[in-house]
Amino acid sequence: MKIAVCLKQVISPDAPLMVDERAGWIREAELPRETNEPDLYALELALTLKDTHNGEVTVVTVGSEHAAVTLRDALAKGADNAIHIVDSEAFAREPLQTARALANTIGAGGYDLILTGLQSTDFGHGQTGVMIAELLDLPHVSMVVETVLEQGRLRARSELEAGSNQWWDIPLPCVLTVQSGINRPRYAGVKGIMAAKKRPVRTMPFAEAHATPLTASLSCEAMVAPTARETIILLSGAAPDVAAQLAERLRAVLGH
Amino acid sequence: MPGTIVVVAEHTGRDIHPATWDAIALAQRLGPERLVAVMPGAEAVGLEAVFDARVHELWLAQHPRLVSYSAELYCLALQQVIDSLAPSWVIIPHTYQGRDFAPRLAARYGRSLIADCTAVVHDGAGLVFTRPLFQGRLNARVRAVGEMPHFITVQPGCYGQDYAKLENVALRVQRVTPRLDGVLIRAQGGPPQRAAHPSVDLTRAEAIVAVGRGIGSAANLEMARRLADLLGAELAASRPVCDEAWLPMERQIGSSGLTVTPKLYVAIGISGAIQHLAGMRGAGTIVAINKDANAPIFRVADIGVVGDLHEIVPALIQVLESRRDA
């Protein structure tokens, strides 16, 4: 079984965000980066399927040169191959552009299963995985929380709203977008980390992967920090003072 | 001037999904000459009347194969309707269902979605949409460019019932039958299943103390539990806490969990990702304790404490205990 997993490197969700108005992006040079957390669940699902059913896992990313770390981490955890679509403008890509570069690259690989995280923690477009399915004319199931693979037939359970869910029968090859929290992503061992250093990473420029002229659907004009509600009552001071004020207000709300 | 705008109406067969009204409210703000709600499905009985004076037309795309939802069938059906209406905008609720089919549909037209929009304004030069970045820590202001139609998804709850009554508009209902016979559908869905019956019902709680990732560890839940006891509140959590299995999923608040409206909601170490806010912004009084002054939770909070929860919460417990003992 050949599995491709799309990974994205993002600015760490807790990093302080300062908007660089001229660049139309945040000042990211010094900020910590990490693999998009939702993608880690997709990677773990791929590695678990490989452990059970044999096969190979290829990880693919669209990102700047920094994103090589994300591929190395995945190789260290047990991925077999890595493809880096190198793109210094990755932060400015629209979902369809990223999806097209990924679909063109993955489409030629003969994969049985293509996995992505549900969405990224930076842009949160939540479109790339489903668009890859459309571009490759493959079926998809989104927000997958459980999979069963038997005799070449895949069943995937998708999460619905308000705690409901639904099972899907889906033939291979197909695309699944994976909901967060469905497994416990493994850590890389020392042996894996050492082995990963020797593995080749295939690189290609974004323009080559995308192959066709870029078309745009949206233009981001500004990024602004949302403001707190104007009517918010902010309590400040030392912890005991704040606690006393807060206790008073809680009592008023609850009436006891 | 936008000519025709299509809004995809989501329904369960019995009810219209409330996010449909957010999408209609946003669509109305684009100033359409012709606002068309499109409802794919089988016989959606008696749902037509609620669209009166909210849209100009309701198109019921009916076919036996649309009885249960499938992204592949929805895309085929909607594509046929869009091609015949030639709209300038297609507006879709950013629900689980919308997120499942809208990217496929937009990609079919060579378009990206402007996803999860929370507002739209005219600024003289055109329409500017607001959408969250970094899970709500920043907002992007975005314009649609390129070929029409533009595809927009709308965050549930952003406009609520804040749509206009269209004056002098008699709803025109149009039934269309998409060509779906003989189409090969690959992903086959079973019936939707309800979650196992929960052992607690947080939707009836008068007060809720909810913890987020900022709590740090399962051991720290003890102080949140103590605070909840002192307030007569139920303990709940945001998704990451339940993903870590520190609390059971049945106590998860947000779009993938419960929607609650208690009198008091105390959010401890919860940054306020959109998915969480969707489940609690209807609470009476929202108290937020968080070390990050820019956390989105402070946008919905009535009372805010910017500080270290590991100092504030124990101090609060101490005050409440001494009150009780006095």
Image: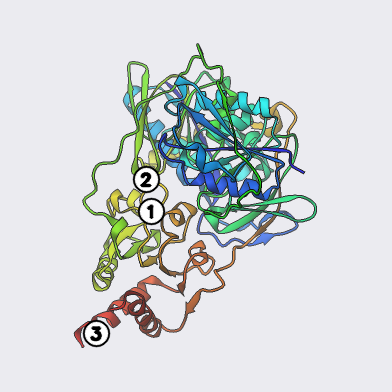
To which residue does mark 1 refer?
A: B259
Residue A3 in view here: yes
User: Which residue type carries mark 2?
Assistant: Ala
Dot 2 falls on a residue whose secondary structure is helix
Q: Position of residue B172 (x, y in %)?
A: 61, 34
Question: Circle 2 is placed at which residue position?
Answer: A162
Q: Is residue B261 shown above or below A71? A: below
3D distance between C-alphas at marks 1 and 2: 8 Å
| Circle 3 residue | B322
Q: Mark 1: which secondary structure?
A: loop
Q: Quadrant of the C terminus of chain B?
A: bottom left
Q: Amino acid at mark 3?
A: Ser
Position of residue B274 in the picture relative to residue A186 (left or right): right
Work out which quarter of the rendered image holds the N terminus of chain B and state it: top right
Secondary element under disc 3, as helix, strand or loop, is helix
* Co-location on one chain, circles 2 and 3: no
Residue at 38% from the left image edge and 44% from the top image edge: A187
**Residue depicted at 68% across the width and 45% down the height:** A92
